[in-house]
Image (spheres, rainbow, N blue to C red):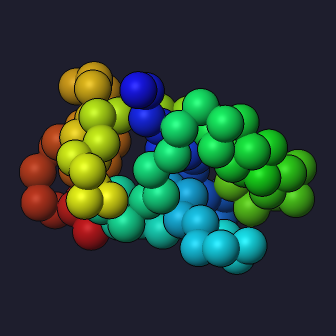
């Protein structure tokens, strides 16, 4: 079974953000580990939420990220690009959050 998280960039700060969904409520988090992990049906619904957020100028360029779910609500990125985005800047600690 394929699993996904939704990522974007915050329009306000430029930070990488991840969609967190709890019941009918949602929000954006800078902590990748707290992103919601879903299947293909959830991905489509959550991407629609994220695209609406983009139209409201809250985030920029939302998209679904393929992940491997660990069965306990966590996940591992399937690409180096997404691992780097989740980990923050690679230019040294001076720019890290």
Residue 47: quarter of image: top right
The reply, left or right, for residue 44 in relation to residue 94 is right
Residue 24: quarter of image: bottom right
The residue sitting at 69% across, 48% down in the picture is: 46
Image x and y of residue 3, in percent: 43, 35
The residue sitting at 27% across, 68% down in the picture is: 97
Q: What number of labels is visible?
A: 0
Image x and y of residue 37, in percent: 45, 50
Image x and y of residue 57, in percent: 82, 57
In this orientation, which residue lies closer to the viewer: 12 or 36?
36
Above-or-below relation of 51 to 97:
above
Residue 10: quarter of image: bottom right
Image x and y of residue 19, in percent: 56, 58
Where does the N terminus fall, quadrant-wise?
top left
Q: Is residue 81 visible?
A: yes
Q: What is the residue that sits farthest to the left in this orientation?
A: 92
The reply, left or right, for residue 47 in relation to residue 52 is left
Above-or-below relation of 70 to 33:
above
In this orientation, which residue lies closer to the viewer: 59 or 48?
48
Q: Is residue 27 visible?
A: no
The reply, left or right, for residue 84 in relation to residue 21 is left
């Amino acid at each position: 079974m394929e699993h996904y998280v939704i990522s974007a960039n915050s329009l306000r700060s430029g930070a990488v953000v991840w969609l967190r969904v709890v019941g009918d409520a949602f929000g954006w988090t800078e902590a990748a580990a707290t992103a919601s992990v879903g299947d293909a049906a959830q991905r489509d619904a959550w991407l629609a939420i994220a695209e609406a957020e983009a139209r409201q100028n809250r985030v920029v360029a939302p998209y679904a990220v393929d992940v491997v779910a660990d069965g306990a609500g966590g996940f591992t990125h399937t690409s180096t690009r997404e691992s780097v985005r989740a980990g923050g800047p690679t230019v040294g600690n001076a720019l890290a959050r």
